[in-house]
Image (cartoon, rainbow, N blue to C red):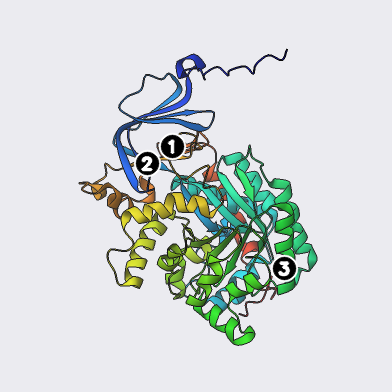
Amino acid sequence: MTPPPAIPSPPPAPSERGPADLVITGCTALVHDEHEVAAFVEDASIVVRAGVIEAVTGGGTEVDAVERIDGRGQVAMPGLINCHTHSPMVALRGIAEDLPAEEWFNDVVWPIESNLTEKDVELGARLACAEMISGGVTCFADHYFSMDTVAAVVAECGLRAHLGEAYFSSQGPEGRERSVEFALRQRGSADGRITTALAPHAPYTVNDTDLAATAELARTHGLPVHLHASESRDQTDNSLARYGRTPIETLERTGILGTGTDVLIAHGTGIVERDLPVLERAAGTVAVATAPRGYLKFGWGPTPVRALRGIGVPVGLATDGAASNNSLDVWEAMALTSLVQKSAEGDPRWLTARQALHHATLQSARAVGLGERIGSLAPGRRADIVLVDLTGPHTQPVHDLAATLVHSARSADVRTTIVDGRVLMRDRELLTLDLPSTVRELGERLAALTDRSHGRRIQEYDT
């Protein structure tokens, strides 16, 4: 006679499992209610075990812990997510100022990038990761070259990253093949902190044949796609004049939006009304990353956040590379998104501080395909947490905590940054990167990196 199935024992109480790995006490915790609206729990305790948030409670906790952090006077919130950047480009910060996009690419950036070595990429990635950790970024989506090198830096420093090896059609089939090989090789690496994507550069540098091949490869291997598209209204107008379709319509025509693949579109300031039904009927999840500081510098219009939210497209926050944006400060991107959208819509009621926090947390997590793992402080989510000090004169008094976080707090107010339960910065001290040596070594290489006398460039900007 077959015995009945065993009834599983209830999970042991926390005290029976030994001490938690980390407990944060006395903080104010930013959580989300059942409607995903930002809410705050006073005098909160956050319990972390095995890299996962076990509990977020009001009042004290009696749980023993290997490590404890006193969060009094600080707000605990989900780590910020930089949904689109080119981390090694911090080496080019401020080198191409006050130029239109065509001159920026053709005369400065793409000639310099023809000099890039793996060591330049490594040092740039190290400096970028130090900057992001210092500013409360716990995850970033990167789209660049020599991405195995970037992945090694991510594995070492403890950040979470969504990485794609960029390619142009001018590189021939080898560029696309390298992108696929990288994505398959690094998927799930760094103890699961690295996710990967295929990374064609843009519809104006990757032809329809290569985009269609990318769509098929993404479907075959279950990979998302991360690319630039409709970066500006000029790109959209030029595409319509040349081909009779917008860049977004090109993505549909080539299957990028039609095979069930998840797609992350960088910028999208050139998305127009005729693109909205295209995005809405896409077979996979489509998200847009907005980086408002760079658009202000290039004189581009804003990403149409309100229209995209109206059709259910998540809009995550981003900085783009520091060569165009000058910083990797997602805190600033959050404030600028709110302010630029108010101006663009002519409506001070849009985008509110709580809506901006939603973009910075849950929507950004969804944009990089991690909506079920990060983006909120809740049991079962990965313990990607930052502590923000609000005791400075520029954040006092606090009448509306959401507004204080978005419009008064700064990236330098982040005191502690935690990823997967590991403390990467504590009391403003970086624990996983040697910043002085990185800055020194990068400085020694700048003359060779920035030389343009050779007359080469890696690509031609011609939209």
> Image check: 339 left or right of 418?
left
Amino acid residing under circle 1 = Ala
**SS of the residue under disc 2:** strand
> Reading the chain from its start, which is encountered first: label 1 or label 2?
2
For the residues marked 3 and 1, what is the alpha-carbon distance in whole angstroms? 39 Å
Q: Quadrant of the C terminus?
A: bottom right
Q: Are marks 3 and 2 in contact (CB under 8 Å)?
A: no
Three-letter amino acid code at the position of disc 3: Ala
Evaluate whether residue 452 shows in this view. no
Secondary structure category for the residue under label 3: helix
Q: Where in the figure is residue 362, as x and y percent of width and height? A: 45, 49
> Mark 3 sits on what residue?
212
Kindly identify which residue carries mark 1: 378
* Label annotation for residue 220: none
* Alpha-carbon span between mark 3 and mark 2: 41 Å
Q: Earlier in the sequence, mark 3 or mark 1?
A: 3
Residue picked out by circle 2: 31
Residue in the image at 35% along x and 45% along y: 413
Q: Residues within 10 Å of mark 2 (few under 14, many from 20)?
A: some
Is residue 133 in view from this perspective? yes
> Taking 261 as reference, is 383 left or right?
left
